[in-house]
Image (cartoon, rainbow, N blue to C red):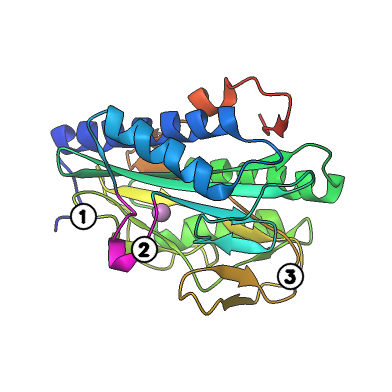
Amino acid sequence: MALVKTDIEIEKIRKSSLLVGETIAEVASRLRAGITTLELDKVAYDFIMDHGALPAFKNYHGYPATLCISVNDVVVHGIPGKYEIKDGDLVSIDCGTIIDGYYGDSAYSFGIGMMDPAVTDLMRRTKESLYKAIEVALTGKRVGDIGYEVQTYVESFGYTVVRDLVGHGLGSSLHEKPEVPNFGKRGTGPKLEENMVICIEPMINLGKRGVTQDRDGWTIRTADHKPSAHYEHAIAIHKDKAEILSSFDAIEQVTNHNILIIK
Ligand code: CO
């Protein structure tokens, strides 16, 4: 698979990634204390099918659901189930779709009801680190420049970067080359090329960086059980400014007094 995409391919990835944002927004409109993560997953599945697309995560290496819903100390890959969302929860929602053979992938973190300010700060800085990274994701730069940006930004607030999971190329598969770590050294790693499409997805912990995997084979949680935030955009690499192919606009337009959206 080619790392560098044609303009037509980029349009397809954009279409798919925009549907992901709309799906997460639809889920956000239903997100509140008392709803189960499985109910939220059904909202996403129906929304994606109603739009003539396919959920990208379902059956991916055997993954059983449409969304990954990762609450509090769950970093990523939380499997929707009987868990009821509670006041004070940090809820990260990750979604992927396939339209016309091309993948979309994006993630957003929400706060439910009365939140610990330390957790909303973590959310805000994690989101900001994503945009800092996007600013340096330019043709001729290297993957290490992206990681450096995320890492130095979040570590300046005392947060830590999860090392075990990384961002990735995106196209006619969900995970393509290159790997895009959220840590690294400037000027190192694979070079970013014009029209490459990558997902940048910082997973940032309030406590220590170590993670563990549950016996379900998916759920990744912080070893110290402190909360973790996750935001993800799919972007196309260009000379002067990366194009953000996914969008948080639909999500950030949701008015729901039960959830906190970091704008
Ligand atoms: Co991803």
Q: Residues within 10 Å of mark 2 (few under 14, many from 20)?
A: some
Q: Residue at x 49, y 61 (%)?
A: 77
Q: Position of residue 127 (x, y in %)?
A: 62, 43
Tell me the element at label 1. Answer: loop
Is residue 142 within the magenta segment? no
* Dot 1 or dot 2, earlier in sequence: 1
| Residue density around tag 1, few if under 14, some if 14–19, many if 20 or more, within 10 Å | some
Picture disc at residue 191: none
Residue 59 occupies which quadrant of the picture?
A: bottom left
Q: Residues within 10 Å of mark 3 (few under 14, many from 20)?
A: some
Residue topped by disc 1: 3
Q: Position of residue 51 (x, y in %)?
A: 28, 27
Kindly identify the amino acid type of the residue bearing the numbered disc 3.
His
Mark 3 or mark 1: which is in front? 3
- Closest to the camera, between mark 1 and mark 2, is 2
Which stretch is magenta?
A: 56-65
Residue 115 in sight: yes
**Ligand 1 location (quadrant):** bottom left
Q: Residue at x 51, y 49 (%)?
A: 38
Q: State the residue position of label 3.
A: 225
Sequence-first tag of 3 and 1? 1
Identify the residue position indicated by label 2 in the image: 63
Q: Amino acid at mark 1?
A: Leu
Q: Position of residue 100 (x, y in %)?
A: 15, 37
Classify mark 3 as within 8 Å of ligand 1 or not, answering yes or no: no
